[in-house]
Image: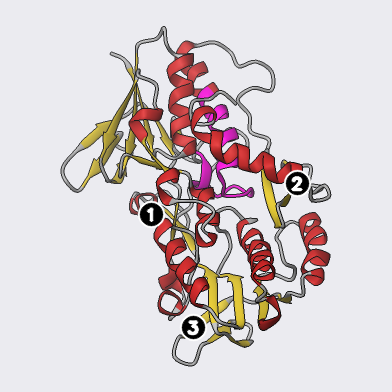
Amino acid sequence: MPARIAILGGGVGGTLAANLLARKLKDQDVQITVADRTGKHVYQPGWLYLPFGAESERNLVRNERSLLDKRVNLIVEDFSRIDMERRLLVAESGAALPFDYLVIATGSRNTPEDVPGLAEGAYHFYSAEAATQLGQALRDFQGGTIVLGVGGLPHRCPPAPLEFLLLLDADLRRSGKRESVNLVYTYPIGRPFTIETVSDFITPVLEERGVTVETFFNPETVDPQQKQILSLEGTTLDYDLLIMIPPHRGAEVISASGIGDEQGWAPTDRHTLAVQGLERVYAIGDATDLPVSKSGSAAHFQAKVVAERIAAEITGKPLDEGAGLYNGHVMCFLETGNEQATTLNFDYDHPPEPPRPSRIYHYEKMLFNRTYWYIVPKGIV
């Protein structure tokens, strides 16, 4: 009987893991199946550019089947529960997918309902629809106070709110509107970014751009009529336009299966990526509770580790020294506006040291955005 590998979620981590396993196990008797709710693969980093008209939604979506190795099966189904006793993925429709090995790559979800009034009173760019709506709001905006902040930690792509803020500042300057706009940035902890070295880098940039920073600001309620946002710390901010990254939680299937913590993140070993307490079950990307960025970059590196470990288990071959262990590696770009960017390259033991912003890094990011479809999901890099 073939070894059955199920991968729950067809984002960057799930797609890459499937393709790597197909190559590593090409001579083995295995069945590799990606189970995805929509069958569509979305390049989420592109949402950052939609409100500025610098990207189009159609460029950010591909058919998941087109990205998968021909030896990988695809099931388009909304599996709502993981039955560990019977080792099945179970859907409300009655569909079931058995597995011997499971990779949870379910990503995360926006939960604006966690903050009363947030869904009605704020915009964001953490979905294609929301980013499009925000773009229209920015085109209609005539001046006043824009409050842009983070509604809770953790959230997907931690640098993205800062990137959006700096891109917005540059866009307002180009259009001649910056002097009529007061930009306010809020963050839940006592500095403008979780990682201290990045915070030290970005603080003078924000000062130079004339951005007011409110730290220790955790949104409690939003009043869309009065256009006010109140924090748990007791601070009230008035706004004319509110852009607030909604709180995030893990996928509902994790909570429904009794696997996750109170926010729905799967408890994951920081090096092996095994879900703690479950046999032959791994988690990657946003689904984990790991102390690293919830980002495609993290999922990218984690998928390689999981593929190594599963392939070694099935073939019985020992792992090479250092292989099959995740060291917390993340590498991403941070746009700073004016066609410049920097990079964040770090792991568990080495914090990032962002280099001086450069047009080179910006154009590298633009090139990566264009070539992503051809290199990352297919495991070329």
Q: Could you give the CA–CA distance between mark 3 and mark 1, rounded to whole angstroms?
A: 27 Å
Residue furthest to the bottom: 226
Nearest-to-viewer mark from 2 and 1? 2
Residue 186, picture quadrant = bottom right
Q: Residue 77 placed where, x, y %?
A: 25, 41
Residue 296, picture quadrant = top right
In the rendered image, which residue does mark 2 sit on?
359
Q: Main secondary structure of the magenta part?
A: helix
Which callout, 3 or 2, points at the residue further toward the start of the chain? Answer: 3
Q: Residue 180 placed where, x, y %?
A: 66, 83
In the rendered image, which residue does mark 1 sit on?
255
Q: Could you give the CA–CA distance between mark 3 and mark 2, rounded to whole angstroms?
A: 38 Å
Which callout, 2 or 1, points at the residue further toward the start of the chain? Answer: 1
Query: Which label sits on residue 222?
Result: 3
Q: Amino acid at mark 1?
A: Ser
Q: Amino acid at mark 2?
A: Arg
The magenta-colored residue range is 283-307
Q: Residue 214 placed where, x, y %?
A: 70, 77
Q: Residue 182 placed where, x, y %?
A: 67, 81
Question: Between 298 and 101, which is closer to the camera in this rendering?
Answer: 298
What secondary structure is marked by label 3? Answer: strand
Question: Between 286 and 45, which is closer to the camera in this rendering?
Answer: 45
- Residue drawn at 79 percent across, 42 percent down: 350
Q: Amino acid at mark 3?
A: Val
